[in-house]
Image (cartoon, grey):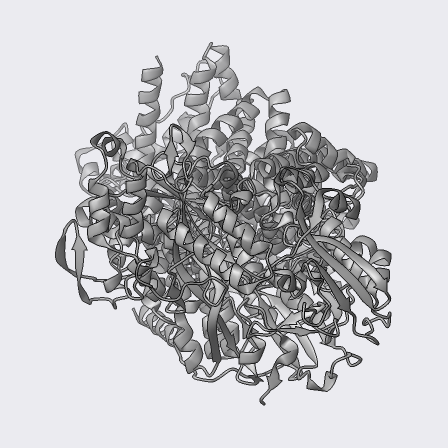
Amino acid sequence: MKKFLSIVLICLALGGVVFAQAKKGPTLRNRDPDTLVFVLAAAPQPLDPNIYTTLNEAQIMREINETLIGMKSDNTFYPILAETIPTIQNGLVSKDGSVYTIKLRKGVKFHNGNPFTADDVVFSFNRILHHPKSSSKSMFSAVLSVVKVDDYTVKITFGKLKDPEYATVALTSWEDRAKYMTASPYGPALNILAHYCSGIEDKETVEAAGADYGTKIVVGTGPYKFVSWPNPQEVQLTRNEAWWGDANTVAFKNIVFRAMSEQPQVNNVLITGEVDMAFNLSKLDIGNLERNGLVITTKPGVTIWYGVFNMNSDLVGQKKNGKLDLSGQYTEGDSTHLRRAIFYSINPVPFIKQVDIFNGYAVPANQMMQPGFLGYVEGAPAGTPFAEFNEKTWYYNKEKAKAEFAMLSPEFRAKLGPESVTLVVGNVTDRVKIANNIKDQVKTTLGFDLIKVVPMVNAQIIQQSKTGDGYDMVVTAWFTPTMDPDYTCIIYGGDSIGTGMNGALYNNDIVNKNIQIGRYSLDRKTREEAYIKVQTQLMTDKPYFPMVYENVLFASHPRVGNLDQAIFKTKLVDIHLLTRLQ
Amino acid sequence: MPALFIGGAGMLSNADIAFVPDQYFRKGSVMFRYIMRRILMLIPVLLGVTFIVFSLMYITPSDPAQMMLGANASPAAYKQMREDMGLDAPFIVQYGRFLFGYKHPVFGYKGLLFGDLGRSYVSNRIIFELILSSFPNTLILSVGALILALLLGIPIGIISATKPYSVADMVFTVFALLGASMPVFWIAMVLIYTFANNLRIFPAIANPRDFLSLVLPIITLSMNSMAIIMRMTRSSMLDVMQQDYIRTARVKGMDEKTVVFKHALRNALIPVVTVAGLQFGSLLGGAVLTEKIFSYPGLGSIMVDAIFQKDTPQILGSVCFVAITFTVINLAVDILYGFIDPRIKSTFSTKKKLVRGNQ
Amino acid sequence: MSNQTFLRFFKRQSKNISQFWRQFSRNKLAVASLILVLIFALIAIFADVLYSYDFVTSNSLENALLKPGETGTVYFQEKDIEHTFILGSDNYGRDILGRLVHGARISMIIGFVTVAMAVVIGGILGAIAGYKGGLFDTIIMRLTDIILSIPTILMSIAIVAALGNSFFNLLIAISTSLIPGYIRIVRASIISIKDQEYVEAARVIGAGDFRIVLKHILPNITSPIIVQSTLNVGSSILSASWLSFLGLGILPPKPEWGNMLSEAREFIQYAPHLLFAPGIAILLTVLAYNIIGDGLRDALDPKLRR
Amino acid sequence: MDKILEIKDLHVHYYSNRRTVRAVNNLSLDMQRGRVLGLVGETGAGKTTLALSILNMISAPQGKIISGSIRFDNTDILGMSNQELRELRGKDIAMIFQDPMTALNPVLTIGEQIAETIFKHEKVSKAEAWSKAEEMLETVGIPGVRAREYPHQFSGGMKQRVVIALSLACNPRLLLADEPTTALDVTIQAQVLDLMRGLIKTNNTSVLFITHSLGLVVENCDEVATMYAGEVVEYGTVKQVFGNPLHPYTKGLLGSLPDYSEGSPRLRPIPGLMPDPTNLPKGCYFSPRCPNVMPQCHELHPENSSIEVHLVKCHQYQENLHVEQSI
């Protein structure tokens, strides 16, 4: 019995140790103070900006490879490798708005000492557009040609397909582009030139390195240079003392990027001070991070969480005699009513508050466009479909939902069994949680368990979205790295049916026409009007339900400063802008 | 390794021994032939492994072509990419390419039979290079865990066996089994929370170059093996302590320490060696979760990522590598076994008795 | 005839049972574990009586993250109910105790079904390999080697990733890795027994294969299979939990201990009670099965019998 | 003659699951120095338990010596400390087990196993112990060079020779031979026994020779004791017991031996089985099987009756000590 008691005591003591709270802030124990440790959400792909595009390597590459034009955190452009921002006013953009003449900064050298010239620019754009592995082809598809004028001048011409039919042709060379495209002004031209994928690479090095470029050999002109990549989860950079900018303003001598996929673990290592900065935290316990002395930075982001109603679905779609019917004026059938019933049953505000989903770091979305972008409709102006929107309850309206549900024909109603509407969602915890919340809200509002949540691998969702088979609804998110509305329009443009991005198979001529206007015009006013028309039409047809705009959220070690300038809405950080406070 | 091997280990090991040929060690050449036979036997096994893994990967709904293209790729570009990657070919053609090679300027490789699977779809690194660079890290973790498991498991097993059903036995059994009864990630979380967050003794990120940071992952990983080794030691020890030669030793007037450590332990450890070998194999494959939690750069996390990303060449290469390692370790254990146990010849010539004896 | 053979088989077994029980009950820990498992089994069987399934799977966000013992108002089936959350509530305001109770059912199903599948498939394959020998044996044993050379975790991940995330696929994934163990046990026993004189004798007097298997081989393999199965029930429950950790297990809102634990891991600092309830449930169950398995092994192993 | 071993009123019980196995009951037995005492009885009569009790090796918690005394050369074995016992075992009292196949540790060389005993009990260096071990092997007819071999490299008879060498390595005063030849085939048996006899003679070792073979007793022993259900029911010289068996059980044992003399009746086995040691009958333990059973046999447990040095535990002789003379 004594033995037994002693065991119990040992257990209690162990338990005590587990919950012993030692309130210490993050330290720098065993760590080089000159090194900034930055957490990435997953192992980065090769550091080859022309080819790889995910956020993880983008964060690293933007410190190594510079773009011609940059965008500040307030969305204004500034020249990096270009000497000036080309505009029609300064004559560097042709009158028709299609040709951009870029004067390159002189005296810039790559990390290995090679000079930066127009050849490198032409080479880089060629890789973006024509390398078989390139993943940013579509983002840069409006580039018609990039031509070297002299060593320090290039001409970039934008354009569009001569005929939309040519969309089925894969353009694999400049010749193809010249053959199938015609010059045209391009609205987001500066945005894509400022996008990290157009980071300029050294032609000579890339050609010599072959397939090893990006993993073993990485060269750029930026403030940091590549040191080593000892394992897939860790990349080390060091300050480029020969940077054309002022290397003395770069506060941290070294950067270590570490991939960590376990979010609770990210919080742990932030608290212990093993890392300096992270965005893929567990949002749940931000309070605990703050109590432990970490600095939380949050700002509105460019991620929109939204739901999709499949227009091709018999239950919630918009079909007439078996064909899509979205010509602007459509007959309201049973599926229209059910779609609206579901729409009005949803209320994203609770999941914004919910600690394990957004935990308050998001705002309700009133439309399918991110705030601050051209064409974004502020608030809930009367006389528009946005008038129903309310910051507190979103578009949620129990009476309306029930009324729409009551309008269903008895035959249609009889067809609806429990869990008959399939809601497909990416196989990621957060998304499944949101989908389950929606299921629950519809059940509570309509008093009928209508929705079945089916988690799927993302690729499978994209595959099904190409044809619109096998699902009625999708919950997903969109992220606009170019900071231009045109890129958000991909998700509802008729021309992206078949790419899997337009999961609703929404194909409304008014919308399509205005997207085209916005895309191929340089005039702000024209573009803005076009995009407002797009949004108004979208919220009338309701093929989508915008849920929330997710904030960008960073936690950082108290020694890291100038966070507001350095952190972007795109979740990227200009690490060379950070300062050291301790 | 997760708990899947618990308990089975003892039985598996003996069944394993049973197919060792009778003439083991009788002549040097027999031994050599035996090793050659085991290596030859590896070939159908490896082919089977690749076939099963390839089939599983083939039906996995992920799409590397889509992933490579990024968002909003035009259908034309997508079709082009699938063609380039060879993903549009029928199943058997694709499998054949993995074995015998695929010709393409960007995605081509010589084939598994020629030791080249090209580059990973995701990381664009040469597959075997990545495996070879990350394998030592996993090895460090596994060897550390095995050593810890042996250091703790064997003494606890001995103590439990010398006093079976006593309070000490029960306490030790429960403590050892606790480790094997908790989900690995839970152990890891509690360890991190306690020792990294609150006590600040060990870091929460593991790094192969820093011994201190390896402590928590090694403890986490070794829990399960420790329980298995402890139980194997205990039951083997219990068995041995019943043997006549132990009584002989006592009758000779040997003190209890000599009886336990000289006479009993040496016999009891023979099956433990086999189990330790099997455990080592499973630790190598089983470091996956530990690596993931401690964001440790090992082969395990590469393999899991490869499965999720449908990085078929990477996963095929890695699994083959692990299978070969696993076989080599088992072979080494079998050979080692012969050196430890002088009876090996007679044991194998009466293999039926051995198998029956263990049921 | 077969009926009679069965009867005789069980008669003989029942004689052994009292002897076995005497041996087993010496291990107090194992007896305690057995009682615990039986209690959990009862809870699993009567889960619906204790808590309604709809209740434990419906969200009620206003009651989210209540501490153990707190009371809240739940809107359930069109009316408000006063409810005391004995073990608190999770991030969706669902009763943790209720979810544990229903989780017990799912965990038990996972444990037993995976093992049953593995025993049947492994047993049949092992019997064919051992009894028929020759080509059958070679093929089946190579298959076993193949499965054993793929790390268990990866095999399970790959199966779930390939077949999709469903309850049945989870069962397949877990039980695949258990099968080789049974093939080997059964095969080894059969090989060791089939040439024994008494089996030869039985064959000489014209006993059929079925009868031989039932009368001579089955009794010899039941003990190791029972031991192995008991241990595997625990390990299956664990496997399900780490598959949940990787996002491949049973998905919420279905209450399964593994996914409860996996979801709760974010709450270790914020609401530890979320983490401890399912953690301890898994721990106790798996521990109990392991101890029972060890106890069975000791009790069924004639070598250790005194 | 002086007694090397005196056992008085020994009770040994084993426990399993609330049941008590009464393995040795009220056993008294004396052994003379330099003599060979045969102990015969059926399997389960408690012979091996007795031998282990003499070494005080009944291990708790399963078994326990309840009462009685065992005096070896006038020292009380049961009162000895563990340390004293370890010095006694192997040196003063050695034991040979039934099965040579399992009595030797398979992972140690036989030389090691013998030398270890010598090193433990005699003040010699390891090298001396080793050479003495080789000598011992030579004595039992095994070349000394084979000391470096492992038990599995020897045949059964050779192993038993090794065991004998092992047990006689320290010149014990008392040797407990527990069915030393049962596991061997007949020709080997004879060789091993010859060897044992010779060694015992030269060393003047007293031997407790446990067997169930009456033939071996006649050949090898000076005295004989018959054991039944944990007690000695008859004791005397070989001549006395075999020439004139008194106890019905001994008679039965002798009767169950095949007799090849002409006109002898057929083999007569003793009917019935040994009583359950957890549930011994009241009165005489042999009463359920006894052909000459009397009413008091079921009630009273018989005491020793002595006819000179010929002891017997039977009511027949207690009633009338002279009855046997009339038989």
Query: In the figure, residue B91 lies in which quadrant?
Result: top right
* Residue D232 horizontal/vertical position (percent): 37, 44
A438 lies above or below D182: below
| Residue A217 in sight from this viewpoint | no
**Near-viewer residue (A281 or B300):** A281
A53 lies above or below C116: below
Left or right of B124? Residue C140 is: left
Left or right of B322? Residue B232 is: left
| Residue B97 in sight from this viewpoint | yes
* Residue A564 horizontal/vertical position (percent): 53, 79
Residue at image coords 66%, 84% = A251
**Number of callouts:** 0
Query: In the figure, residue A152 lies in which quadrant?
Result: bottom right
**Near-viewer residue (B162 or C252):** C252
Residue at image coords 64%, 26% = C138
Q: Residue furthest top?
A: C206
